Structure formats: C-alpha cells, structure tokens
Amino acid sequence: MDFSHTEERQMLADMVGRFVRDQYDIDTRHANAKLEQGYSPEHWEQLAELGVIGALFGEDVGGFGGAGFDIAVVFEELGRGLVVEPFLATLLGGTALAATQSHADQLEAAMAGGGQLALAHGEPASRYTLSHVDTKAEKTADGFRLNGNKAVVISGGSAETLVVSARTSGEASASDGISLFLVPAATKGVHVRSYGTVDGYQAAEIALNDVDVSSDALIGAEGQGLAAIEQANAAGILAVSAEALGAIEVALDMTLEYLKTRKQFGVPIGKFQALQHRMADMMIEREQIRSALINAAGHLNGAAAERDWHMSALKNLIGRSGRKIAEESIQMHGGIAMTWEYAVGHFAKRIIMIDHLFGDEDHHLQQIVTA
Amino acid sequence: MDLNYTTEEQAFQQEVRSFFEDKLPNDLSRKVKENKRLTKQDMETWHAILNDAGYLNAHWPEAFGGKGWNAIQRDMFDVEGNAAGAPRVVPFGINMLAPVLMAFGSEEQQEYHLPRILDGTNWWCQGYSEPGSGSDLASLKMSAVRDGDEYVLNGQKTWTTLGQHANWIFCLVRTSKEGKPQEGISFMLVDMNTPGVEVRPIILLEGTHEVNEVWFTDVRVPAANLVGEENKGWTYAKYLLVHERSGIAGVGDAMAGIEHLKHIAKDQKMNGKPLAEDARFAARLAEIEIDLAAMRTTNMRIMQAAAAGAPPGPEVSMLKIKGTVLRQTINDLTRRALGPYAMPFVSEALDLGYNDEPIGPDYANPVATDYFNHRKTSIYGGSNEIQRNIISKMMMGL
C-alpha cells in the first residue's frame, strides 16, 4: 500500500495544472462556455495534443493511462479551472467502448481530439437507475431501429458520435436486454436539443425517432450492455468527484484568503472564532473527500461490488460534504459571493450540480445500504 | 498510489493475526468484547504479553529497541487487535512519555525509564490539567521551586487517568512567572511514592473510577528528574501532543464498534423485522461506514507523510476531531438501537464472574454507560474546540 503518486502521474497532474493556471482563468472559461459548441475547439485540440484525453484510457485501447488515479488527477486539475471542454462525455463514451473492446477506431479518434463522443443513456423517467431503459431497439433486415428519448446527455449537442443504450429485450428495468449502439449524431431521426446547464456546461435532450442503424453499430454483445454502462458510470463518478475536489480546493483557498483580508469591526473576519471553527471543519471534510477519492480510484478497475461500494461512498461524501463546503464558501464571503463577477460562486455551482450527476447523496447512501 | 497490500504486508497481517489468536487470553478478549471492566491485573497481563512478543514498542525507532513500524503496519495491528478484542494499551508511558524522553531526555533518564516502561515496573500517568487550567493549559499554576539539588512541588493536577494504578507521573509545572505563561513551564518526572503526593478519586457521570485528582504538598523531587531544560516544558508537551498519536483516530476501535452495532441491529426487532432492515437506521449506519472508510485512509496518509519526514502537526488535530466524533456517533447509534433496554443498569454485571440472568439482551447492560463514558473523548487531549483553534492557527494562519 502506498499513498504517493508515481513520477509519471505527478507529471501528468502538473501538466494539466499548468495549463489551467496559465491559460484558463475564469474569464477564459466563461468565454469558452459561450462559444457555439459550449467549449473552445482550440483548447480541446491543445489538450488532446498534450495527451490529456489519452491519459484517461488504458494502453490496451490505445491510450496511455486509464487507471483510476490517472482519471482522478486529470479531473481534479480540470475542476480547479472549471474546464468546460468535453472530457467527461469523452470519458463516458470512451469507457463504454473500451469496456466492450469494440470500435477501436472511434475511440482512437476521440483521444486525438476528433469525433467527439457522448453517452446517451439516461432517460426522462430513469433518474439514477442504470438499468432503467425504455428506449427500444427492434431488429430490422440489416440492423436495428431505435425509438426513445434520452435525457440530460452530457455534451450531447457537440458530439459527433453517440453511444446509445436501448432495449433489445426485457422489461424497462431488467438488467439483461440492454444493448449499446454507436450512432452518428447526424443519422436521420436523431433530434438533438442542446442547452446550457446552470453551472455553465452543455447537455442535450435527444429524441430517437425510427433511427435505422446497421448491425455493425452494435457495441459488444446484444443485450449485455449494462456492465459497460456500469463501468462508464463508475468512471464518471470518479471523474466528477475529482473535479469537485479541485473546485473545493479553489473555493476553500478563496474563502481562506478572504477571511484574512476582509475587515469588519476593525479586524480581519478570520479573527472570529465562529468562522475559524467552521473553516477547520471544512478542512477536515476536504481531507475525508480526498481519502474517499483515493479509495475509489484504487478500485475503479477492480471487482464490481467493491468498485461500486467505494464509488457510492465517494459520491455520497461529495454530495454531503461538498454541499456544505460550497454553501459555507458563499456564506463566509457574504454578499460578494452572490455576484457573477466574483469567481467563488461559479465553483460553488459546479460542486452543487455535480450532486445531480450519476446519483446524488441520497441515492448513493441507499446503494451502500443495499450493497 | 497503490491500495493493494504487498506480499510483505500480507505476511505481516498474517503474523499479527496469529499473534492475537495464540496469545490474547480468552477471558481478556471476552471482557473487551462484552464491554466489561478491566482490572489493573488485566491491563498488566496484556502489557506483559505485548512486551514479550516485542509488539509493545514496535512503533519505537529501532535505535531505542523498537521495530520502526510504518503507518500500514500500525494500521493493521490496530485493526486486527480491535477485531480480536485486545485491550487498549495504557498509553501514558509507552506512547506519550517515551517519545519525549527519546527526543529531550538525558541519557540517564532514557536508560533508567525506558526499560521500566517496557517491563511494567513503572506505570505512568499524566499530570497536565489543573482545576483552573483546562483548555487554557498554559495558565497552569502548580509550582516547582528549585532548592539545592531538588525541586519542591506544590499544587494540584486533575483528570489524571488511571492515576490510581500509577506509581510515576509526568507533570507540567511552573518554574517561572516571567514572560509569556508558556515560557515558564517545565516537564518533570515524579515518583508518586514521594511524601506529599496524594491521589483522590473522581467518579465519572456513569459511575466509574477512571480519573483522579493528584495533590502535591511540598513534594521534593530530585533536580535530575527535570526533562530537558527548565522553562522549555511547553515545547516538549506540544511535541508529545502531536508526536505519538497514530492511535488518535481510533480506526480499529471504531471498526470493532460498528461490528458490534451490526450484531445488535440484527438481533433487535422493530415492527417484527430486524432493526438492521429499517431504512432510517440503515442509512445512519451507512453514513458512518462511509466516513470511517475515508478516515482510515486519511489516518494512513497522514502517518505515512509523517514517516516520510513531514512532522505531523495540525493534521493530528483533524484526526482527533473526526475520530472522536465518529466513535461517539457509533456509541449514540448503539444506544438507540437498544430501545427501552438501554435503560436497565446492573453495575456488578460489568465484572467478570457475574452469573445472574441479564436484564434484556446480554449485550445491553454496558451500552448506555459506554455512550456516556465516550463523551469524554471530544473533551480530553485538548477539546475538539481547541483542536479547531490549532487547525485555524497552524494550518490556515488565521
């Protein structure tokens, strides 16, 4: 057991950290979010060239990372900059492809920064239940015909290729019978309604109306797609939790700096014990979150039961303690944190909205209970 | 980063498991698991067994006869020991005084005291708090006045844990009233058989005799019993507070507590079904398990960083707060798991040899007293509020 990073991984973290620090201030971030795709293609290309996308995937599929700790260090640094480029969507779609060992060319293109992927899995009625799939895939003469609706697909609007889950058999929440399909977003019958999220990212509602795909579009074995979805979901939990930790670090740094400089009653407000003790509690929770992140990262590619326990533990803690830190960061700043111009609110928004990705605090507490 | 145990670590785990299986007496582990009272003899027996096996001081540096155990090994020993029902080692000599002597004591003091800590000749207790000096420890008043080759001690210490069993006490005493209060404190070793030392019991709210007052009236102590330099005692005391606190998070104890709680929750019925299946109870338990899994890693990370040379400071305060609150939450949930049977209390049933029919379930009797007893943990060793002050000052510069 060892809690220090290898030199390579530390270099990866430093590289992404340097990019964020030098090239991605909060104004750049806001500007990127306002671009047509919801991110900057130039920055995306630059990060792809640096190998940051490839670091998210294993060597067996053409990447040069893919361990839980690779994903964790990359996303923690991305979280420090609230980076809007489509890393998460690429991780989700790519992990589903990697888990099924199919369409290697698509994944390689995505790692190079082209052919952006998105995972179109969640549905209007599925909430956080991974096996809940209403979308149907009926067999046709030379492939499948898809019908259904996909909800809040991360970066769905900018994706060139969608990884779509659909039921080839079984009832709406059966574990068996879910299949995955690779669907170009431009396919006839795919209707994408893209929108911004409250924290500055992009998502889409995607309607599939008689979408015909060839049998090549099937990813992995028919009806056996859930395991790949679960692996992608676990990677997603790890990624957004690491991102939340990065955002938490920034929010805490800003709050601490503010406590030292803001004066009221003739002294820096950090002199008040009522604020000091709350700040101390947040420092403890931050360490707890980092520990849970390490535990989860170490189990990402392990046995499913342990993987899921640690992912749920992590995500519950992010929901529970992350919210506390986000809310307290605003409260301890006071009015200034309520403004758009002051950055801490944007970090708080991301931390809070991450609770709505891949299952919130309550959902994951329940997962632990039933584990 | 690698969460897998190495082959060596796995072998070590097997070694300590076998040790607890072979060497931990059944009556002792039964007492611990059933939350019965441990006698002085019980504690001495376990101390001697650990010493024979070389485990008592395994965390000491090799230069002082220890094995220099790392964070992972300590964690394993803690977790395995608690799972097996091993008694807690009385920490005052082995974990608290010994590191101070190694760092600041004279060679004579090291040579005289360290072996006597190990072989159990001397049972140490801690003389820090005074009636007027709790959280504001540096305001302590007990005086030590130099008189030839001796110091003359006058004053009172309090909250002296297991002082009724001890024959030596290490004290913070005032040797100067000049300058800041911290600058006039010295660290003194006192043989409790010296005339003028008197131990008086304090009975805790749940009825146990665990702590004491220790009174000093014209107690003459050889000047050679001063540790380090006069008026530098505060530095040594702070060193003690952060140095040897790997056990402060109480990971193994909390894990054993959760196992005990799960056992109770399976047995207790609510609306005809095991309490363990109640959604609200299960959620509360799950939250504790999540926090504990994270704390175990936090503990090992901090200890590993400390071993790599970063001296633990305010990080220890984090562990103290999180560990005590978590343990108290487990105690609280265990108490509530019992329902009405948390109420009956038969004091004699806490002693081994009590054979009457238990009132209610056989695990019920000590639960509420244990809950009340554990309220001390967020108060002692620097209250959790003081720990937050330390974090604010040392870690955040507030």
Image (cartoon, coloured by chain):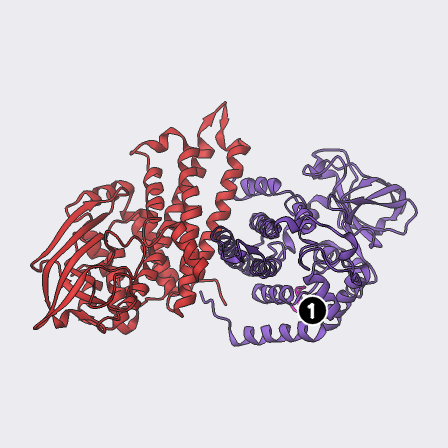
Q: How dense is the environment of label 1, judged by Cα within 10 Å: few (below 14), some, or many (20 and up)? A: some
The magenta segment is B59-67
* Residue B99: in magenta span: no
The residue closer to the viewer here, B230 or B132, is B132
| Residue A50 seen in the figure | no
Q: Quadrant of residue B258?
A: bottom right
Q: Is residue A226 visible?
A: yes
Circle 1 SS class: loop
In the figure, is residue B116 to the left or right of A123?
right
Answer with left or right where residue A300 lies relative to residue B354: left
Total tally of numbered discs in the picture? 1
Where is residue B171 shown, x and y percent of the image? 78, 46
In the rendered image, residue A96, in percent from the top left (x then y), is placed at 26, 66
Q: Amino acid at mark 1?
A: Tyr
Which residue occupies the foreground of this view, B300 or B31? B31
Of helix, strand and loop, which mostly describes the magenta segment?
A: loop
Q: Nearer the viewer, residue A325 or B193?
A: A325
Q: Quadrant of the N terminus of chain B?
A: bottom left
Among the chains pictured, the one given red colouring is: A
Q: Position of residue B50 (x, y in %)?
A: 73, 68
- Letter of the chain shown purple in the rendering: B
Residue receiving disc 1: B55
Q: What is the quadrant of residue A346 in the picture?
A: top left
* Subunit that carries the residue with mark 1: B
Q: Quadrant of residue A61?
A: bottom left
| Closer to the camera in the image, B217 or A218 | A218
Residue B63 part of the magenta segment: yes
Residue B328: give x, y in percent of width and height. Answer: 61, 49
